[in-house]
Image (spheres, rainbow, N blue to C red):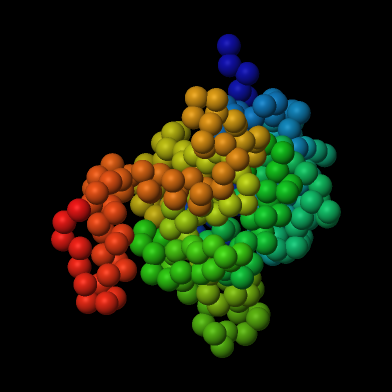
């Protein structure tokens, strides 16, 4: 027999979830598919049952994910810099007596382990792509520090890298996205509930760059989730789970141990080149790279 239970939420709660910050309800209540996916990920992969988990929900909006987890017994802290949508979640919490759920109005860019402590699961849903690149690295680092098991990220990505940004000597590709006009006043920016708080431009990572960022921060495994299914999910929108674990040591191939990803890439790249071209061709290519500067060329070895 299933231990899952459907709680009968009132019409006011369901209507606020359907609107999701809009003036009219979303088409087919499609966000319900993402809610299902996120809850299933937690149920399937968390090391503890819901009623023993502590969960942090970044940029929670109405708090639908936080409320779903709290109904299952989790201790949840949900925060958002805007209160227009979050106030609806507070009303649901109060009507249903969810004392294990707390809403806080705060800028997620200031949330860290010192202010909110750690959590088994961190929800970072629909917010990464609203951040400017100057903020995103600090926020992802803070999430890593707070996370005890894993973070779930649902985000837009760039299908093609149009620009590169640098951080700590690393390069990441993506594209910029216009959130507001540069001369929009603060009150106009804050009124756009589905846009960034204040930055005119946000940065969307390519999938490969986002995975490398999570690896660079310290997450040991990163997976893309495709089931539960989300029919008609946009091509440039993905759900990923990043796990914080202990790096393994490999006995059968000890050369991979205690190396950075850059060092591993160099070894694999060299071996691939030697395998593809042969040692003689590799040496010839390397020597000619020097000789060509002097108008010379080695034709035979």
In the picture provided, is 97 more to the left or to the right than 205? right
Q: Residue at x 60, y 75 (%)?
A: 199
Q: Residue furthest bottom?
A: 183
Q: Residue furthest top?
A: 1
Answer yes or no: is residue 118 visible.
Answer: yes
In the rendered view, does 203 fall on the left or right side of 84? left
- Where in the figure is residue 187, as x and y percent of width and height? 65, 80
For image coordinates 28% across by 42% down, the residue present is: 275
Q: Residue at x 51, y 49 (%)?
A: 263
- Give whichever of 113, 72 is nearer the camera: 113
The relative height of residue 247 versus residue 300 in the rendered view (above or below) is above
Residue at the far left: name it: 299
Residue 214 relative to residue 98: left or right: left
Residue 153, image x, y percentages: 56, 48
- Could you say where residue 114 lies in the image, as x and y percent from the top left? 83, 54
Relative vertical location of residue 116 with respect to residue 22 in this rendering, above or below: above
Image coordinates of residue 109 in percent, x first then y, are 70, 63
Whether 29 is drawn above or below 178: the answer is above
Closest to the observer, 280 or 137: 280
The answer to whether one can see residue 68 in this image is no
Q: In the image, is residue 102 above or below residue 168?
A: above
Q: Quadrant of the N terminus?
A: top right
Residue 209 versus residue 186: which sits nearer the camera? 209
Residue at image x 76%, y 28%? Answer: 52
Number of labels in the image equals 0
């Amino acid at each position: 027999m299933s231990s899952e239970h459907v709680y009968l939420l009132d019409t006011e709660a369901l209507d606020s979830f359907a609107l999701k910050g809009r003036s009219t309800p979303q088409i087919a209540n499609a966000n319900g598919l993402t809610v299902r996916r996120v809850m299933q990920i937690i149920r399937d992969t968390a090391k503890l049952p819901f009623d023993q988990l502590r969960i942090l929900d970044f940029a929670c909006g109405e708090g639908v994910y936080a409320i779903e987890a709290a109904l299952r017994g989790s201790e949840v802290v949900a925060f958002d810099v805007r209160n227009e949508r979050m106030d609806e979640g507070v009303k649901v919490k109060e009507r249903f007596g969810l004392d294990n759920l707390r809403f806080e109005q705060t800028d997620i860019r200031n949330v860290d382990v010192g202010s909110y402590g750690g959590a088994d699961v961190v929800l970072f849903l629909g917010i990464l792509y609203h951040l400017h690149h100057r903020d995103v690295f600090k926020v992802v680092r803070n999430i890593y520090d707070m996370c005890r098991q894993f973070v779930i990220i649902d985000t837009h990505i760039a299908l093609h890298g149009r620009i590169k940004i640098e951080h700590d000597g690393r390069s990441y590709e993506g594209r910029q996205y216009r959130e507001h006009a540069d001369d929009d006043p603060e009150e106009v920016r804050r009124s756009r509930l589905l846009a960034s708080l204040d930055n005119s431009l946000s940065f969307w990572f390519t999938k490969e760059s986002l995975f490398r960022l999570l690896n660079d921060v310290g997450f040991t495994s990163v997976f893309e989730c495709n089931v539960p299914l989300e029919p008609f999910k946009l091509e440039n929108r993905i759900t990923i789970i990043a796990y914080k674990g202990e790096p393994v040591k490999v006995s059968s191939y000890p050369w991979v141990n205690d190396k950075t990803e850059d060092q591993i890439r160099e070894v694999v790249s060299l071996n691939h080149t030697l395998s593809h071209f042969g040692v003689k061709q590799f040496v010839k290519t390397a020597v000619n790279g020097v000789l060509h500067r002097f108008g010379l060329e080695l034709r035979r070895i």
